[in-house]
Amino acid sequence: MAVCLGGGLAIGAKPAATEDFRIGEAGRAEAMAAAGGLQQRPMERVLITAGPGAAALDPTAATAAAHKITQRMLAMPAVESVAAPVFSSDGSALRVDVTMKGAELDGKKQVAALRAQTEEVQRAEPGLLIEETGGPSISSGVDALRGRDLARTEMIALPITLITLLVVFRSAAMALVPLLLAISSIAAAIGLSMPASHVFPDNGVGINIILLIGMAVGVDYTLFYLKRAREERARGGGLLGARAAVELAAATSGRAVVISGLAVAVSVATMYLADDVIFSSIATSAILVTLVAVASSLTVLPALLTVLGDGTQRKTAPKAGITGAVLRRTAANPAVALGISVLAMLALAAPLLGLTLTDMGRETHPRTIPAMRAFDRLNTAFPQLKSMHQVVVTAEPARAGQVADALRALAERARTDPDFAGAAELRASADGRVSLLELPVPHHVSENAARRSLERLRTDYLPATVGALRAADYAVTGDIARYADYPAHQKRKLPLIIATLLLATFALTVAAFRSVVLGLIGVLLNLLSAGASLGLLALVFQHTWAEGLLGFHSTGTIGSRVPLLLFVILFGLSMDYQVIVLSRISEAVRGGMPARRAVLEGVGGSAGVVTSAAFVMVTVFASFVPLHIMEMKQMGFALAAAVLLDAFVIRMVILPALLLLLGARAWWPARSVG
């Protein structure tokens, strides 16, 4: 851990740059604009309205305040330019647009100094309400809110995890071991992620993913190992030494941990196929922390257990009561248990048919962020600022006049369209090769009218104007295009990733247990689990009935990244349970036990560790539900629901029912279980 952290800090991390986020036609247009020096700059807007108790805005006082803002902002090294103040159409507000230097993503690093200037003017003008908002302010506010939220989740997840482990082991020393190994694995993975970011840039969520996955798999793998070592010592009647018990655990649960860890890493690696910096960063973080957790459980953990010796065997863990009762009922009539549970899972999956995916627009951020409250007031006073289209055209410099005429014709068509608003702005690069037309839209990016305007622009206005020019390349970007193109990109990539996931799950199960049937069962059960959890997610978040219960305002949609994350992470983590359960059954069959009894012994023997591990995972994932950021809230809910269903319905009912019905055929074509 020390070497990983030290090396990582010495090398440093490489954050993702603006160009790393370019996707689809919108990304192509941004690259074209950047080639001509017309890329979008970070912009802040200072809004001046009437102060508390004032009947209306005083234009003279507002203009004077705007002059002060302008002078202060121009003196800031991070500011490139300040536009002339603009009054709203009804005279109720005055705004000052401040363009910052640097790339679009760099604005939030410098915005605090600008906001300090706005606050100084506000203190000097108590009769006015002076606020600042914009992309940098909102991004900075979201990051700060996410940091506070994650700190609270750690305060919730760590104590509950510790209590769960105390109940499982009835020993404070043994309860601390999984927690400490998980934390040390997380620390080492954070160190390793820094040099890795020079290959796969970090988009800002890498540490969050390391915490999320690291706590889950770190505790899980350690739990599997510890429980098995205790069982071996208990089976030996206290005569088995600590070292021998650890060696037996290494030969059984240690092998299962390696298989599980590889399954998680291979499953998560499919996210690289998304061709997206966000998923590449997530995949890198998850793979690193998983492999570090596996290495810890195979090296540090056995050494620690051997050193602790008799301290690992204080009291036996309580036997699973509810899971035992469920297993007995399943064994009594496996066909009925299978039918009822599958129908229940399919019923939960039914809302998946109405799943609506969108990128979460800026307007979905919580209003606890001051910049978002100013954002609402700004959009009320200046509705044309809600979103915009940017049409980018590249052509030979000699044809710059023709391009400008075509773009003006396009602007004239849009001027009479009710889905567009305000005056268009035309700019060109210094060499005349690149032209950019900005078209304001009085609708938020998530509204149907905004999407209609994009479709009309791309399929009607552009082909009829710029499209008539020969040897001219054009594309559309802007807030709405980004919002539309990202989910479309994900939808195109999702089938490939899911197909690769299914193939990986099948191949790993077949390789581990030499059974084609078990491979097919693993694929089907993972699909059933993912479908049910996604259906439950749609049922909760696409409607309003659970808003008060979970503290959110429904957008009627699901974040476009959530399903892919759910599929990939669930497929990886569910292999934990699959491997631990099937490994125990495999051992029993290899020992000569009849297939039916092996299933009951294997599932029953692993029930305690599976339910305990699932409870820890559910606690970690569910701690994300109270977060304010909608996409993280949805991801936490979906993963918690998926693990809960997978551990208690799939592994405790459906899997044993299937294995009981199939008997020895479940292990085909292997002659013996391996």
Image (cartoon, grey):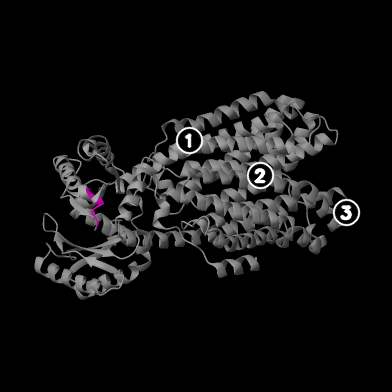
Amino acid type of the residue that numbered disc 1 sits on in the rendered structure: Gly
Of residues 277 and 145, the one nearer the viewer is: 277
Residue linked to disc 3: 240
Q: Looking at the image, can residue 623 be seen?
A: no
Of residues 363 and 520, the one nearer the viewer is: 520
Q: In which quadrant of the rendered image does the N terminus lie? A: bottom right
Quick one: label 3, few (<14), some, or many (20+) residues within 10 Å? some
Residue 666 in percent (x, y) is at 72, 28
Residue 75 in percent (x, y) is at 25, 75
Label 3 vs 1, first from the N-terminus: 3
Residue 529 image-quadrant placement: top right
Amino acid type of the residue that numbered disc 2 sits on in the rendered structure: Asp
Q: Which of marks 2 and 3 is in front?
A: 2
Residue linked to disc 2: 576
| Label annotation for residue 535 | 1
Residue 560 image-quadrant placement: top left
| Residue 437 highlighted magenta (yes or no) | yes
